[in-house]
Image: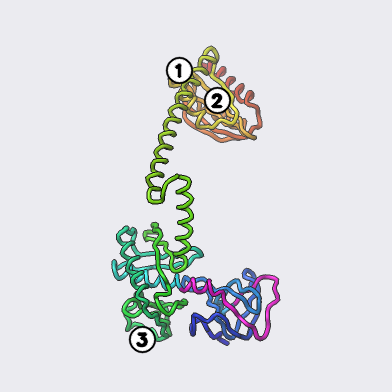
Amino acid sequence: MVTEKLFYQDAYQQSFHAEVIKSGADHEEGPFVVLDRTAFYPEGGGQPADQGKLDGREVLDVQTVDGEIRHYLRAGEDVPKGKVFGEIDWERRFDHMQQHMGQHILSAAFEELFDIPTTSFHLGEDTVTIDLNIEALSEEQMVAAEAKANEIILDNRPVETKWMTVEEASRYPLRKALAVTGDVRLVIIPNWDYNGCGGTHPSRTGEVMAVKLLKWERQRKQARLEFVCGHRVLKQLHDKQAVLKKLAQLLNSPQAKMSEAAERLLQERKDLQAELEDREERLLEYEAGALWQKHSNEQAVIEVFQGRSIQSLQKLARLIVSKEKHAIVLLIAEGEGKLQMVAAAGAATTINLKEYASLIFPLIEGKGGGNPHFIQGGGRRIVTSKELANAFLKKIASDIKNS
């Protein structure tokens, strides 16, 4: 028995009486019922499924499976039998109607103004996206398409739906070729858009209220455009206004001058960062000199630090060997359960640090690499820093003895 689709007879019907003609359970989706008639729209064509209640039980999802419309209920709930009373979540349904109709109008605007067809549509929980068959959108195109779409909405044009054969539909100026056979449902905005579609839509364009384009990004050589319609426009405005209000307080600036205040703040931060980096560089140069003085009479400059970054060790080691061509440096940073190390050799030394890497890193079950004059890496703290340094010194002594 085929379920009577009340959502096609009247998209505004919010409740209905029906009879359960089948029940069962899917392995993934859970328990479901099939009704002899339903106002619940099953997911399809980019539009999500309706939700609501059947005799007080939550309908979480509605899908068409093997030609039947399944109403999925919460797992563990008893499945109703016989006659039931259904209520759809009207706020959710009307939101989907607004978004879907807005998409039709907007897609038609891009095609009418710029001959850019829509290739796909997705209605998300917060925003809507369409993929346009163009690699990039200009600001001018977005402004013009948005203005045209809102003009059609403000005109409050009627929205018609008609069932007909594919041959009959082909006599209309369709926005895109039909991908079905047999009867097709045409959604029509007279003198604007003619499109085969199985979704739910309002009866007039004015019910869409408004469309607002948000942003676009490149997606597989196409432009994915994100937008909102209807009450979602108001939500976007409310959310953004709340953010602007908070920023105005933080920046101590009126909204009209917030961008200037933000630019000033960012420039100040950039200047402070540059000054900080300059001072850190000078401190590192001073530290490099002090370390060389401390270890100048030893075979190598070896120091152990607590929780120091590998980047800091790299800079410090390079500063020492850039000034002292005969220097050999090993810097170790101890962290929680791990050791990181950097070794550097001045240009006048004859040792090859790449050979040291194959000796040192296995001691800490670590990884690392580099070149004959510089290596770095890290691993587990399974030996002490002193043991690691001793292995390094032993290798130096062996190289000196064999040279």
- Please state if 143 lies on the left or on the right of 74 as rendered: left
Between marks 3 and 1 in the image, the one whose residue lies nearer the viewer: 3
The kind of residue tagged 1 is Glu
* Residue 120 horizontal/vertical position (percent): 41, 68
Mark 3 vs 1, N-terminal side: 3
Pick the quarter of the image with the N terminus: bottom right
Residue 101 image-quadrant placement: bottom left
Using the image, tell me which numbered label, if any, was put on residue 166. none
**Which residue does the numbered mark 1 point to in the structure image?**
324
Q: CA distance from mark 3 to mark 1?
A: 88 Å
* Residue 213 horizontal/vertical position (percent): 39, 62
Visible residue check, residue 182:
no
- Disc 3 vs disc 1: Cβ atoms closer than 8 Å? no
Check if residue 85 falls in the magenta segment: yes
- Please state if 396 lies on the left or on the right of 115 as rendered: right
Front-most of residues 9 and 271: 271
- Disc 3 vs disc 2: Cβ atoms closer than 8 Å? no
Q: Secondary structure at mark 2?
A: strand
Residue at the spot x=54%, y=24% of the render? Answer: 330
* Residue 58 horizontal/vertical position (percent): 63, 73
* Residue 401 horizontal/vertical position (percent): 55, 15
User: Which residue, as the protein is rendered here, is positioned at the far top?
Assistant: 297
**Which residue does the numbered mark 3 point to in the structure image?**
168
Mark 3 vs 2, N-terminal side: 3
- Residue 47 against residue 370 in the figure, above or below: below
Please report the bounds of the magenta region as a residue range.
71-97
